[in-house]
Every structure is written in C-alpha cells, then in structure tokens.
Amino acid sequence: MKPEIFLKGVHLFQSLNPEDCERLAASLRRRSLKKGEVLFRKGDEGNSLYIVRKGGIKIVLPSELGDEAVLAILSEGDFFGEMALLDGMPRSADAVALDPSELLALSRSDFLAFLRDNEEAVQSILSCLSMRLRKTDDLLEDAYFLNISVRLAKRLVDLAKTYGYREGDTIKIDLRLTQKDLASMVGATRESINKELRVLREMGLVSTAGNAIRILDLARLERRAGS
C-alpha cells in the first residue's frame, strides 16, 4: 500500500486532501524494528512523530530497578511521539517493538508545518492527548481500588475489544504479550499474573498458547471485570 493511501486511514490525517496527503507522504521516512528493539528511551531528544504501519509498539515507563509500567500498546494506524515534538522536551517514556514492526517517521519541522496548515489535525492531536490522559487516570484508579483479578479481567476485555479478532466463537488478541508485559500493564508481579491466568483457564474464560491469548467467553469475562 502506498504511504499516501495508508495515511488516509490514520485518524490524524483523514482531513487531508489528496494533494496534501501525497506531499506529506513524500516527507515520511521508513523505519524497521526487530522484536524487542528499542526505538527511543526516556530522556532522548524528540525529533520525530511515528506512525505504526505494521507490527506493534509498547510505550513503557521504566524504573531504576529495572521494572516497567506499560502505558500503551499501539498497532497499525496508531501514532505516537507527538508530545516531545509539541513541547520540545525529552521523550517521557521508552518505545519498544512488541513484534517485527514497520514505522513511518515524520520530522519535527514537517510535523509542525502540517499542524500550522491543518486545524482539524490540531483537534485530533488534542483529542488523542486527552484520551491518553484519561486512560492513565483509569489505570491509577484501578491500581488503587481494584484487586488483581478484576484488573486483569478489565485489561483483557480492553485488549480483546481493541486488538482482538473473531475466530469462530473465540476472540484472539492479536498481540504477542508476555506475562511480564501483562503484569506491567496491570500493576502486578509476573507470578501473580501467571496464577490469575491459570484461574481464568480453569474457569473456561481464556486459553493461552505461548504468548497468544484467546478469549473463550467475553460476556463472563466482562462480568468478572465488573463491566
């Protein structure tokens, strides 16, 4: 798929006319990442906006002890890295490839010029930032007030609805998440997640094979999550 056609499917760029879309596509640079490869670290200079064309990226907040909190999981059509471009500050988190991934990079100067000429894009950026802040608030609220069982169920429901696809009567989450990834998303230990997944398997709610997760009964999982 040509970059200009792909861009029209990205929410941020949907308001562009064909000519502007082609001009913007010409300024994009391709970047390929291997699974586990780091795109940038917290504290790095921010000089590009990135769009996920293939694969998956996790946005991670690291600790000095080597632990991490997964702030977001991004897949095809998602964009990230805009905060450092807007405020000129260093990167606020790490970006790491969950799978072999292909990205499109837009430089800071091209990105800011694009925003100056496109009011709808500014509104889209503000909407995206607001949504991500709300998700962060939800994560903090869950961490304070919900037990691990409910937190994991909520996260699996969210992942199924955002990244899942139907295979017969089941929903396969189209991400290769390790138990460590799930633990950092939920705010728990890997051992706790291992135990909770075993409970969900025994209840007939999920199945796991390697790092693949399949939801067997979404309605019951939603009830367990309090939805």
Image: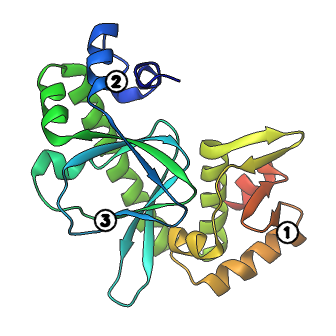
**Does label 2 or label 1 sit earlier along the sequence?**
2
In front here: 88 or 221? 88
The quarter of the picture where residue 169 lies is top right
Local crowd at mark 2 within 10 Å, few (<14), some, or many (≥20)? many
Q: Which residue is mark 3?
A: 93
Residue 69 as seen in the image, left or right of residue 151: left
Q: Position of residue 123 (x, y in %)?
A: 24, 28
Residue for point 29% across, 8% down: 19
What secondary structure is found at the residue carrying circle 3? loop
Q: Specify few, some or many for label 3: CA neighbours under 10 Å numbering under 14, 14-19, or 20 or more.
A: many
Estimate the spatial distance between the alpha carbons at disc 2 and disc 1, rounded to whole Å: 41 Å
Q: Does dot 2 land on a helix, a strand or a loop?
A: helix
Q: How far across and how far down the image is residue 83, in percent?
A: 22, 50
From the image, state whether disc 1 or disc 3 is nearer to you: 3
Specify few, some or many for label 1: CA neighbours under 10 Å numbering under 14, 14-19, or 20 or more.
some
Q: Which residue sits at x=81%, y=76%?
A: 198
Along the horizontal axis of the image, is 209 left or right of 191?
A: right
- Mark closer to the observer (2, 1): 2
- Vertical relation: 117 (above or below) 153: above
Look at label 2 and name its amino acid: Phe
- Ranked by sequence position, the earlier of labels 1 and 3 is 3
Left-right relation of 167 to 120:
right
Q: Dot 2 corresponds to which residue?
A: 13
The earlier-in-sequence mark between 3 and 2 is: 2
Q: CA distance from mark 3 to mark 2?
A: 24 Å
Residue 72 location, quadrant: bottom left
Residue of label 1: 201
